[in-house]
Every structure is written in C-alpha cells, then in structure tokens.
Image (cartoon, rainbow, N blue to C red):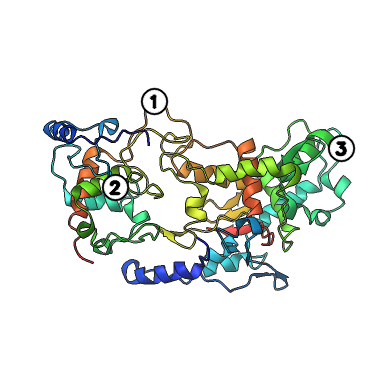
C-alpha cells in the first residue's frame, strides 16, 4: 500500500455514489482540528520510519468522521467525554486508601501529568515490564496509596481517570519508544497486529492498514489510530478504553478475544500507539 | 489450508452422485483451482433468497464489502472487495461456489471470509460473543444458503 492516500478511497467512493446514494465528504484530508479555538492538533503526519514501506501518511481517526462528530470534539462544552474527565478530576483530588492520599498529594495537579499520555505505554524499570497508563494508576493505588481494591482495568472509574490524564496531554506529540527494553514487547505487538484472528480471519492490518478510507457497509474504516483514546463513542454514549476497543474488534472477527490488561493487549497497545508517533494526543475524543 | 484439495475427477463425480445429501464443510471437494463443481445440497438455488442473504447483516452481509448495482435499493454498499456487477460473466457456477466456500484457495491474500469452512482458524470464537467456542464451529452460511447466493450471483450478467 505504499503511496496509498485517502484520495484513492475518495475516488473509489465517488464511483459508488450513484449506487449507495450517500455522502463521502467526511473522509477528506487537509482540515485541521483546533480545540477550544486555541489548541491545535496534528491529525495528519508522515508515518514513523518503521512504517514507511507500508503507510506514508498517518491519520487521526478524527479525519474519517462526519462534520457533526468532528465538531463535537472541537469544543470542550460540546464534547461529552469531558464530563468523564471531570469525574476523573474529582477522583484525582479525593483521598483513597489507607495512606490517606489522593493523586494530588503526590502530583499536585492533573496538569503536572501532561506528558504522560504521549509517552505510554512505556518501560517501567522497577517492574521490568511495559506499563500502560491504566497499569500505572493501579500501581499508584496499590503500592503508594494503600488502596485495597484498585480500579478495575476497564472500569468506569478507570476510564474516567484515563480520560483526565489524556485531556491534560492533548496537543502533545505521540512519541512512544519502540526499542531498547520494550523491543521484545513491541515485536510481540506487531505479530499480533498482522495475525488473522477468528472465523472471519481478519487481522488489524486487513482493515486498518490495507483498507482505511474504504466503506465497510456503512462505516468508514480508519487507520485504527489510538491517539484519541479514551474515546467517547456515540454508539454506547460513554468513554471507551483502548483495550475495550481491541476486544470489540477481535470479537467482531468472530474470534475469542484476549482480556483487557492482558500481555497480548499491552503489547498490541504499544505497537499500535507507536504507529501514531507524530500525531497528537486527542483523548478523550469523540468517535462514532 | 487444512481442507484437502482433491484433484481426481472421479471423486468429483462421486460427490455429484451423492448430491441428494448435504455435503458437510469438511467433506467439500474442490479442484486445484478452488472450483467446486457439485452443488452442496443437490437442490437448485433460489436466487431471490440468495439476494436476501447477501443483503442481511445477520446472514451473508456480502454488501459489507461488495457493491451490487442490482441491490441499490438497499443502503450501504462496501468498498473493501470488488464490485459484483457482471460477476456471472467473469466466473462460472463452480468458481463462484468455490469463492464463497473458501476464497483463500484462489486468492491466498484475500481478506474474504470462508463461508463454508470450520477448521484452520486462529482463536475462533463462539459466534460474536468473544468467547471460546463450545464444540465444533458452525459454518458462516448453511449449504443451501450458499447455493442460493450462487444462484443469485449467476443472474448478475450486467455491468
């Protein structure tokens, strides 16, 4: 797919307009997303070097969505996901656990974590493992705050907190490390990305590398970028985690999914996040 | 590709002679090109029912990936696979049946699902539950469904 651009998808779609009678104007490139009138996002960027032989340009999922969905994300008062980030902020400032600490006890304010989202998943030397933001939150709760029952990996409270941490990092350029101590995990994630799962035998690449911009029935396939997560989906009217979305994708291949927080999904998250190196953190975003 | 591909014409004839019975997924006989000459059921396909299967999201959902002008009264035709307009001029019945049963034989790089194959998968699930399957998988379509879809596709002679 070297050199493939969305224009190819638009041209192909144009041929089908008379048939399906639908508007294809929503997969157009060149528009810019500016949040609240002053926070500029990078929604198109040259693909990271390791990807250049397959994909030349990377696109945020925002590019593939309708005008209405795009607009919702451009203003925090219109973005329903910000309500979840606000709930995360309340939790951030509330003491929990036997140590009597809140997140703010150590981190002062949420903005002090502005650099987190853009660099995760990342290597945790103390634990000798790749950690996601969710794993880091659980670590803080259990190892520093004395929380007996930390947030479930995909719980509402976790998705709220993850939404907060993404929100304060918006506009920062994704820059996830892929070499050094994470190299093995990254390679595992790459292998998963190209494996055809389930009775429909679909890999991530089948839809999101080789068919982005194309309609699959009524939906435009995106590049599967995760820079917008947690993502508020109009489909379920809530913020959704990366692993929750991965699980839904594998389920939709008529496959047996991996669990949220599993080593497979941590590796896949690292790999997919790195395919977005060069885009900006957009979470919590709005998607369909 | 776990399903064996049998070359012998004699076996093809044998399958044909048994066509009163439904051929089970693991017993389907294709030639080296992936073509399947014999009906899977011995019953003629119903093209009208075949069209309904192609449109239905709960059945074949062929429109998820393929555009079909003759079905333009139904919303949303995908762009992932080739248009099926005029498909009957490009393939004969055996070829179309083979493509639906297991497109991987003719097109190893195709992302088209195999609609009548129940083995050789990585982490297959129990339908769309995300859970592990209990017992043998069911094919994506029943044998007669496939015959009906083939019958409909054979009507698509116009571009």
Residue that carries the numbered disc 2 in the rendered image: B99
Whether residues under marks 2 and 3 lie with C-beta atoms below 8 angstroms apart, the answer is no
Residue A154 in view in this figure:
no
Q: Kindly report the distance in space between the C-alpha atoms of the residues bearing marks 2 and 3.
A: 64 Å
Which label number is shown at residue A74?
A: none
Number of labelled discs? Answer: 3
Q: Nearer the viewer, mark 1 or mark 3?
A: 1
Residue at position x 77%, y 52% from top? Answer: A116
Q: Are marks 2 and 1 on the same chain?
A: yes
Label 1: element kind: loop
Residue B52 in view in this figure:
yes
Q: Kindly report the distance in space between the C-alpha atoms of the residues bearing marks 2 and 1.
A: 26 Å
**Are there few (<14), some (14-19), or many (20+) residues within 10 Å of tag 3?**
few
B43 lies left or right of B114: left
Task: Please provide percent x and percent y for residue A113.
Answer: 80, 53
Residue at position x 60%, y 62% from top? Answer: A60
Task: Please provide percent x and percent y for residue A98.
Answer: 84, 32
Q: Indicate whether B24 appears above or below A51.
A: above
First reached walking from the N terminus: tag 2 or tag 1: 2
Label 3: element kind: loop
Q: Indicate whether A107 appears above or below A73.
A: above
- In which image quadrant can residue A15 be found? bottom left
Residue that carries the numbered disc 1 in the rendered image: B135
Which label number is shown at residue A100?
A: 3
Q: Nearer the viewer, mark 2 or mark 1?
A: 2
């Amino acid at each position: 797919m070297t050199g493939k651009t969305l224009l190819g998808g638009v041209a192909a779609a144009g041929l089908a307009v008379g048939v399906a009678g639908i508007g294809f104007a929503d997969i157009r490139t060149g528009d810019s997303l500016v949040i609240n009138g002053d926070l500029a996002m990078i929604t198109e960027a040259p693909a990271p070097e390791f990807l250049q032989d397959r994909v030349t340009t990377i696109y945020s999922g925002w590019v593939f969505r309708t005008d209405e969905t795009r607009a919702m994300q451009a203003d925090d008062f219109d973005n329903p996901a910000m309500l979840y980030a606000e709930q995360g902020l309340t939790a951030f400032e509330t003491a929990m656990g036997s140590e009597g600490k809140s997140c703010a006890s150590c981190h002062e304010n949420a903005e002090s974590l502005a650099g987190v989202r853009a660099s995760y998943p990342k290597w945790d030397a103390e634990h000798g493992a790749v950690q996601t933001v969710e794993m880091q939150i659980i670590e803080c709760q259990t190892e520093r705050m004395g929380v007996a029952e930390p947030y479930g990996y995909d719980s509402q409270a976790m998705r709220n907190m993850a939404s907060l941490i993404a929100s304060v990092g918006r506009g920062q350029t994704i820059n996830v490390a892929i070499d050094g101590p994470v190299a093995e995990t990254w390679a595992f994630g790459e292998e998963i990305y190209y494996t055809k799962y389930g009775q429909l035998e679909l890999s991530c690449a089948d839809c999101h590398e080789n068919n982005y911009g194309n309609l699959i029935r009524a939906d435009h396939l995106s590049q599967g970028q995760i820079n917008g997560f947690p993502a508020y989906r109009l489909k379920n009217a809530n913020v959704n985690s990366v692993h929750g979305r991965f699980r839904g994708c594998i389920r939709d291949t008529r496959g047996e999914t991996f669990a949220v927080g599993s080593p497979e999904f941590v590796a896949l998250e690292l790999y997919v996040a790195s395919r977005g190196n060069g885009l900006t953190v957009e979470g919590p975003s709005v998607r369909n | 590709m776990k399903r064996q591909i049998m070359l012998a014409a004699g076996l093809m004839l044998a399958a044909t002679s048994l066509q009163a019975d439904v051929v089970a997924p693991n017993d389907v006989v294709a030639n080296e090109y992936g073509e399947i000459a014999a009906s899977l059921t011995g019953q003629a396909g119903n093209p009208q029912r075949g069209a309904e299967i192609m449109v239905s999201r709960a059945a074949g959902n062929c429109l998820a990936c393929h555009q079909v002008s003759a079905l333009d009264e139904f919303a949303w035709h995908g762009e992932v696979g080739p248009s099926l307009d005029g498909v009957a001029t490009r393939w004969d019945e055996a070829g179309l049946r083979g493509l639906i049963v297991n497109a991987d034989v003719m097109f190893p790089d195709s992302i088209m699902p195999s609609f009548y194959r129940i083995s050789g998968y990585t982490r297959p699930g129990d339908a769309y539950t995300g859970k592990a399957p209990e017992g043998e998988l069911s094919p994506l379509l029943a044998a007669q469904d496939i015959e009906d879809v083939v019958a409909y596709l054979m009507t698509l002679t116009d571009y």
